[in-house]
Image: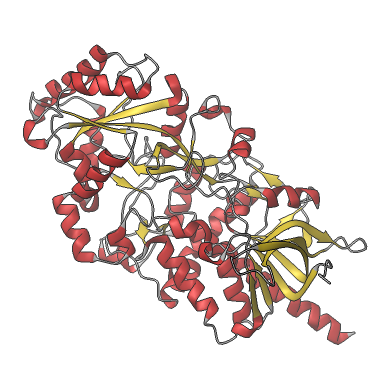
Amino acid sequence: MKSTAPIEYHSDTLVIGGGLAGIVTALELIEQGQRVILLDAEGEQQFGGQANDAFGGMLLINTKEQRKNGIHDSPELLLADWLRAAEFAADDIWGQRWAETYAYHCKTDVYDWLLANGIRFFPAVQWVERGNYGNGNSLPRYHIAWGCGRGVVQALAQKLRQHPQRKLLTIRYEHRVTGLIRDSHTNAITGCVGTAQLPCAKASGGETQARAFQVQAKATVVCSGGINGNIDKVREHWSPIYGPFPENILNGVSPAADGAMHDEVLKVGGQVINLGQMWNYAAGIAHPKPKFPRHGLSLIPPRSALWLDAHGNRVGPEPMITGFDTHDLCKRTGHLPGQYTWQVMNWHIAAKELAISGTDENPHFRDKKLLRIIWQTLRGNHKLVQWLVEQCEDVIVADTPTELAEKMRALSNDNRLDSTLLCQSIEQYDAMLQRGDALHNDDQVRKLQQLRQWRSDKLRTAKIQPLLTKKNGPLIAIRERIVSRKSMGGMLTNLHSQVLDHDQQPITGLYAAGEAAGFGGGGISGIRSLEGTFLSNCILNGRRAARAIIAQQAEAARLGDNT
């Protein structure tokens, strides 16, 4: 007779979510002799979560890579930049405290810890999110992990699986948590309930059956990710600062990031805040091989391309250009006609500057091929451009502005594009450049000149050039939309990663880390990230949660011994 009783698990600590934050938390706990059960709603192939698809950039200071690049940084300067960019509200106390903690501890608690676990970084430090008005990173701080995000999370997952204390760890895949257990007498969180998909006993074709389960644990850490894979939740929490909700929005993360655990934390009295603060990108394109509805890729868009609105006008008066303020690019796109844009460039610019954010989209970084990266940087990534031209519906190529305009009108199919305006936008820009360096008078050119002063950007930025140059190949137009990526709000946590209730008191036994916690304090980045603050804060949050759990349980044991 088939059993219908829930499967029961018992452990010291329950970790919900097998992404980077969950893996780090579990690794730290078993290192200290804690029994851990780690539940993941996805299958084993997805273990590691969104980090598997991330480019792998991290905002870090006082590293050997910074020193080798002649960069002299400090926690004080990082914190000043962070607070200026974040524009925290007066009541964002815990977000500010986490930001200060990150500034002063990211070197030891993230960078040094990763080095100790065998993770290395690309030697050139990138300068991203400078701010349109100097309200971003004062210095280059963006470190790209060798192996990209997948290299980081899978190296740590391997450490977890092969740990000398592996017997303390139980990992259960395809176990979806549907609720938290709260003790009716103490109000402490003592575990969870959920539904598991288990292989059928007599099945040979991979069939599964649903089975209820429950976990009893002294501490529970929620590492379930954010809400941005759930477009309905993105719509629900959409901030009007980005304009009306864009019905053409793309989804850059797995639908598994559905925000269901946020609702469960609310049910047990925890605070969930700032869900309207999201880190989306303005340069999204349709994925040529989508894995789920609305699946999009996030471009690292060419800086030398002209960024145009749906009519063919150059966006202005201040030109749109990446590398300075992603938050602003999304705001501006959300208020433009049709809530989409065009970038127009020539083949040479595209090959030199165009990239896609992600692990598999950067195979040389993923596979740690330094010489190939150097060669590609010098020669251009023609293979990527060719792939996009052939496979992506949002990428158009043409020999003349008139031909390009016809194809753009056909793709947009909304009668917005004015062919005359498009041709004028290109011709006016080229005419300004052809007057000579001494007579250049354009804010985009000024920013390009600034970018080329930093050696890493100079290698990745084309020389300033007219678009209509026969030797630099045909024209390319890319239609770009907002792509949903990361939640910057989430469960409100203190510096021990404990979830707080509406009286700002910790809910006994309940912790949160990573994107579920807004990367710390329900929103460590405020309204604007300095970039590279997501993977690194999964590590910082997870390690803090583990330390707090170990300390709390040691104190409980000490008090028990004394009685």
Count of numbered tags: 0
Residue 416, relative to residue 47: is it above or below? Answer: above
User: Does 325 sit left or right of 275 as displayed?
Assistant: left
Quadrant in the picture for the N terminus: bottom right
Q: Residue 196: x percent and y percent?
A: 70, 63
Residue 353, relative to residue 517: is it above or below? Answer: above
Q: Is residue 381 visible?
A: no
Q: Nearer the viewer, residue 183 or 274?
A: 183
Residue 405, relative to residue 475: is it above or below? Answer: above
What residue do we see at 19% from left, 50% from top? 459
User: Does 525 sit left or right of 298 as displayed?
Assistant: right
> Quarter-wise, where is residue 44 in the image?
bottom right
What residue do we see at 40% from left, 38% from top? 286
User: Does 8 sit left or right of 277 as displayed?
Assistant: right
User: Does 92 sit left or right of 427 as displayed?
Assistant: right
Q: Which residue lies furthest to the right in this view?
A: 185
Q: Nearer the viewer, residue 534 or 7?
A: 7
What residue do we see at 55% from left, 24% from top? 244
Quadrant in the picture for the C terminus: bottom right
Q: Residue 316: x percent and y percent?
A: 33, 22
What residue do we see at 22% from left, 40% from top? 350
Q: Residue 512: x percent and y percent?
A: 66, 59
Q: Is residue 194 visible?
A: yes
Q: Residue 333: x percent and y percent?
A: 43, 28
Coloration mode: secondary structure
